[in-house]
Amino acid sequence: MGKNNSSGANADVKEKAFRFIDGQKDEMMRLWEDLVNIDGGSKLVSGVNAVARRVKEEIERGGGSARLIEFDGAGSMVLGEFALGAGAPVLLSGHMDTVFNEPGETTRRPFTVKDDKVYGPGVLDMKGGVVAAVFAAHALKEAGFGKRAVKLLFAGDEEIAHANSDAAGVFTREAKGCAAAFNCESGFVDNAVVVGRKGTATFMAAVKGVAAHAGNEPKNGRSAILEMAHKIIDIQNLTNWDKEYTFNVGVIKGGTVANAVPPNCEIEVDIRYVDPSILPELKTLVEKTLSKTYIEGTTTELVRFTPGIPPMQTTDGVTRLFNLWDKTSQENGFGVARPIKTGGGADSAYTVMAGVPTICATGVKGGRNHSADEFAVAESLFERAKLLAATIIKLDGLSI
Ligand SMILES: [Zn+2]
């Protein structure tokens, strides 16, 4: 088929997909409302599972196949597929859990449409993205798109970095061999798209000192807080702006009463980094720093060192996929996209590690996520479903 025929056929499929989405606006809003109105904090496992079942049903209603991947102690994942052709599949990913772990949150502030905005727990982060992804796939099927399968993969415990699941492993395995991946995380009102993310790690350290009465025998005490105070300064100073890693001592606990030399002190520390290979080096730095004793008679222990989500690297494939998204966005009147790098981890890291060009934050647009003021722009639900579909149609143009 000649180039013109092929682009003509693409335009035809796109028009049909857009028309389908325009005709499904009520259904899309209804699904969004259904998902937001289920309490689904990462720790409310049965709620997340209810969201997962609803998403699975919706994929099946659209003509795709879907199954749940279950874990002990974590919400299920949904793995869906619309088998639309023999080319390398494309992956639409995201998560179904929210940061709101208080039961009854959705009763107190349910899904609400006001003017052009939508409110409710997880409306932006990222139940809207789930709806946009499912309907983009459904629209491609209805439009007769026949080039490649569209896979859908949503986690149930992203907001707690998959602490009790193998979601990271599932993302890596299912992404392998895909032509591209779009992580439909919370989008930005200014059309920013995430092309790089820092990796995360945390650690906890504890100092044991010797308690003593602060008035009667202060010389016999060994202050755990004073020892830790020295170490906190050393740890903060490990931050290296050139090598792009930072240390933040974010939590400190210690002591018993004001008139006792404190026998205990604990800290929790957040680490952010850009180079995926540097993590072992950072752990060694921490161990070395903790091994230096300032106050004889105190002992220090690294209680835990926990790697979180690795960095999302800005590979050439990531840049090419961003360019295709930007071009498609402009061609369809959705505006100029802006590439940004952020400090927070997301599952897009795993799909990039699997060698798949990935862009992140392609879900509905809004702001204030992780707060009670979280909102999404209502119209962006349809816009993002269309832009996902239109970019997938043009993936042939992405030379990987
Ligand atoms: Zn999120």
Image (cartoon, rainbow, N blue to C red):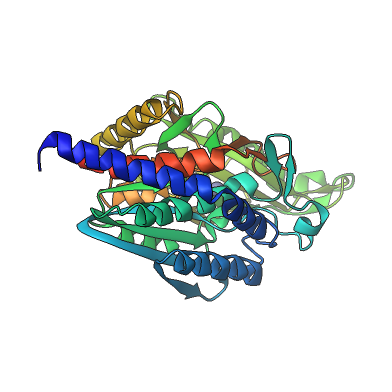
Picture coordinates of residue 6, whole percent (x, y): 18, 40
Most foreground residue, 32 or 218: 32
Is residue 328 depicted above or below 84 in this figure?
Answer: above
Picture coordinates of residue 332, whole percent (x, y): 40, 30
Q: Is residue 361 left or right of residue 249?
A: left
Rendered residue at 71%/48% (across/down): 120
Q: Quadrant of the N terminus?
A: top left
- Residue 102's image quarter? bottom right
Q: Is residue 398 visible?
A: no
Most foreground residue, 228 or 330: 330
Rendered residue at 57%/67% (across/down): 54
Q: Quadrant of the C terminus?
A: top left
- Residue 152's image quarter? bottom left
Rendered residue at 35%/42% (across/down): 14
Is residue 164 depicted above or below 243 in this figure?
Answer: below
Rendered residue at 85%/45% (across/down): 214
Furthest residue toward left: 2
Picture coordinates of residue 99, whole percent (x, y): 65, 53
Q: Is residue 278 left or right of residue 399?
A: right
Q: Is residue 73 visible?
A: yes
Q: How many marks?
A: 0
Most foreground residue, 67 or 294: 67
